[in-house]
Amino acid sequence: MIKLNSLTGFGGGGGGPADPDTWQQVGSDLSISGTGEGNICALSATRIAFADRANDDLRAYDFDGTNWAQVGSDLHFNMPGIPAICKLTSSTIAFIDHGDKDLRTYSFSGSSWSQVGSDLVVSGTGSPQLTRLSDTTIAFIDEGQDDLRKYTFDGSSWSQTGNDLNLASIGEPGMTYLTSSRVAVCSSSGDGDIIAYDFDGTNWAQVGNAFEVGDDNPGQPAMATLTSSRIAFLDQINEELRTYNFDGTDWAQMGDGLAIDSVVIAALAGLTENTIAAIPFGYSTMTLRTYEFV
């Protein structure tokens, strides 16, 4: 496995500060009652939104450097399927689940959540993933149609922009953005390839080479953006938090992974260029925590 150094490309040296090499936990865990899939996204460097399918609640949590705590009230509504959420702005998110298949927008006032605008039914949705492209646009992919798409929110309604790109046999995918026109996607089928895709305003196309995550099927991967070329990655089979870097052509692992036990499924959200929020969903608990790449 090739492992990159963030400043010099390979190995050590370079005369600069020490390069990030491994993940470590920062602060304390916050246990959340209930079990079941959910999803998180970062609203700021210290705040996340959490779509909690186990309790059918949408919530916000703040991190003070040591502890996580809920801020504001829950918004309770039925989540019949696995939810996917992503940030639009520091106070708005996009939401969908594969049960009712409605793409929606929710706004957080600092104390309460409310829906903004109308729903868009996205037919055939299965295990969807969303990621932010801009304040008004998102990328969407799911295992139902195996299609990568872009959607735009005009303040009141959602509509598709440009054409689909069909990614055959994607399985239950992971996805995160790199730039406003580039996303990274990981398949849960086969050996789990990470691939970057660019959007030119009309069409999606692969950029660079595919990267095989490992010899084993990774299960459903969780991914989070750190920088425009770097992502955090966690999957349920290898149970290891890793960092991958994309140079525009090839992917490579940076530093060492961190073993995380008993991951049934996970959700990640990039807080800063070297910190993430994570919820490893175990067999009997949901635990919100923070990790730093140092």
Image (cartoon, rainbow, N blue to C red):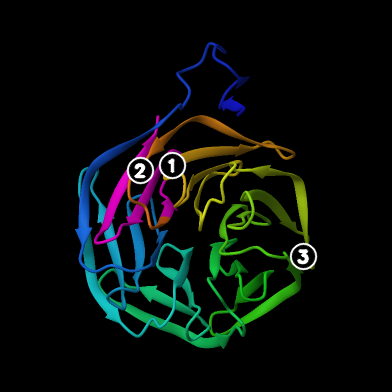
Residue 137 percent coordinates (x, y): 60, 68
Residue drawn 54% across the image and 31% down it: 254
User: What residue sits 57% from the left and 85% below the top?
Assistant: 157
Which residue in the protein does label 2 denote? 260
The residue shown at (55%, 62%) is: 131
Q: Amino acid at mark 1?
A: Leu
Q: Nearer the viewer, residue 52 or 152?
A: 52
Q: Look at the numbered disc 1 and give the secondary structure of its residue.
A: strand
**Mark 3 or mark 2: which comes first in sequence?**
3
Q: x, y (%) of residue 248?
A: 72, 40
Residue contact between numbered discs 1 and 2, judged by CB atoms under 8 Å: yes
Most common secondary structure along the magenta stretch: strand
* Label 1: how many Cα within 10 Å (few below 14, some 14–19, many 20+): many
**Marks 3 and 1, Cα distance to the nearest angstrom?**
33 Å
Decide which of tag 3 and tag 1 comes sooner along the chain.
Answer: 3
- The numbered mark at residue 241 is 1
* The residue stretch that appears in magenta: 268-294
Q: Quadrant of the C terminus?
A: top left
Q: Amino acid at mark 2?
A: Ile
SS of the residue under disc 3: loop
Contact? badges 3 and 2 (CB < 8 Å):
no
Mark 3 to mark 2 CA distance (whole Å): 39 Å
Mark 1 → mark 2, Cα distance in angstroms: 7 Å
- Residue 294 in view (yes/no): yes
Instruction: Please state which amino acid type lies under the numbered disc 3.
Output: Gly
Q: Nearer the viewer, mark 3 or mark 1?
A: 1
The percent position of residue 67, horizontal first and vertical second, equals 20, 48
What residue sits right under mark 3 in the picture? 201
For the residue pair 210 and 139, the one nearer the viewer reads as: 210
Relative depth, front residue between 6 and 284: 284
Q: Quadrant of the N terminus?
A: top right
